[in-house]
Image (spheres, helix red, strand yellow):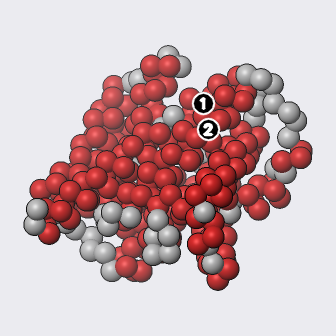
Amino acid sequence: MDKNKKTSNQKYKGFLLVMAAASLWGTLPIFSNFSYRMGSDAMTSAAMRCYLAAAVFFIWMLANGSLKTLKIRELPFYLMYGIMAGGGTFIFYMLAIEQLSTAMAAILLYTGPAFVIIFSRILYKESITKAKFIALCCTFLGSFLVVRGYDLASVSANGKGLCFGILSGISYSMTTVMGRKANQLHDGQMNAALMTIFVIPLFLLLKPAWSIQVPVSGLWPLYLALALLGTVLPYTFYLKGLNTGIDGGMASITATLEPVVGTVLSVLILHDTLEWPQILGVAVVIAGVSIPVLSARKTGK
């Protein structure tokens, strides 16, 4: 196999890993919804997701000895990575939801790929290609339709809420932007573990573990699903995908598949209804996500 073909296959594998991560992230609204029905609240569910996922990652690192590879000089970076990428996304997104409609908050969160492209251009000199620009437009437009951004009643906003929403998008972009630097230090699974573990200091301030009442038995499977399916596996897949050498901007665009998966699952499991613009949005996002995958398969770039 020649070098170009090998590179193409590696990047194709990377996009598949990112798509798998986005699909798993798309299950979060389902498990969250069921946990709320069982009596949990957003902050408690998020905290339990963080604590349990960090525990799984920590046990994994102890079992395979990878914890020994973490150097003291790397701690400041991973603390910043965990707080900015993981904690920042959660906090600003929740604040945006308090100030705005859920639809507008989601749209602003998914400005993340645009910030990835901008920061990657500044920090890593990644080019903004025509294919990348078209894919970004498709995924942003599709996400706008999927979350019903066209409903003027649902997008009424104030200045503070818009600021929180933009900050959530910037924080979300840090998973990719800082992930490039993290991949120079450790592999994808190790980086996913460290990022999650270093979110804990933030949650210890906001929702200390000792302040959470012992959950009823029915909540434990949902909390575990949030931790494993919504955190451990997708973050591992996503950062492993970045480790294959795919373009950070394209990876972030591909991850925009998440709101589509969440919407479809909501229809199938929660029996939500889709309006025709939302169905169109699903198709547009799938088209946008396909562009980087097909480009990598065809050209290896």
Q: Amino acid at mark 2?
A: Leu
Please tell me which residue is depicted at 73% across the width and 27% down the height of the picture: 219
- Residue 31 tag number: 1
Front residue of this view, candidates 52 and 108: 52
Quadrant position of the C terminus in the picture:
bottom left
Residue 162: image x %, image y %? 59, 56
Q: Is residue 137 visible?
A: no
> Is residue 109 something that shows in the picture?
yes
Amino acid on which disc 1 is placed: Phe
Residue at 36% across, 46% down: 19
Determine whether the residue tagged by mark 2 lies in a helix, strand or loop. helix
Pointer 2 with pointer 1, Cβ within 8 A:
yes
In the displayed structure image, the side of residue 179 where residue 279 appears, left or right: left
Q: Tell which residue pokes out farthest to the top in this image.
A: 271
For the point 43% across and 45% down, the residue is 22
Q: Which residue is mark 2?
A: 226
Image position, residue 293 (x, y; %): 23, 51
- Decide: is 134 above or below 279: below
As measured in the structure, the alpha-carbon distance from the residue carrying label 2 to the one carrying label 1 is 6 Å
In which quarter of the view is residue 273 placed? top left
* Mark earlier in primary sequence (2, 1): 1
Q: Name the foreground residue: 283 vs 20.
A: 20
Nearest the viewer among 288 and 19 is 19
State the SS at label 1: helix
Locate residue 224 relative to residue 205 in the image: left or right: left
Establish if 4 lies above or below 261: below
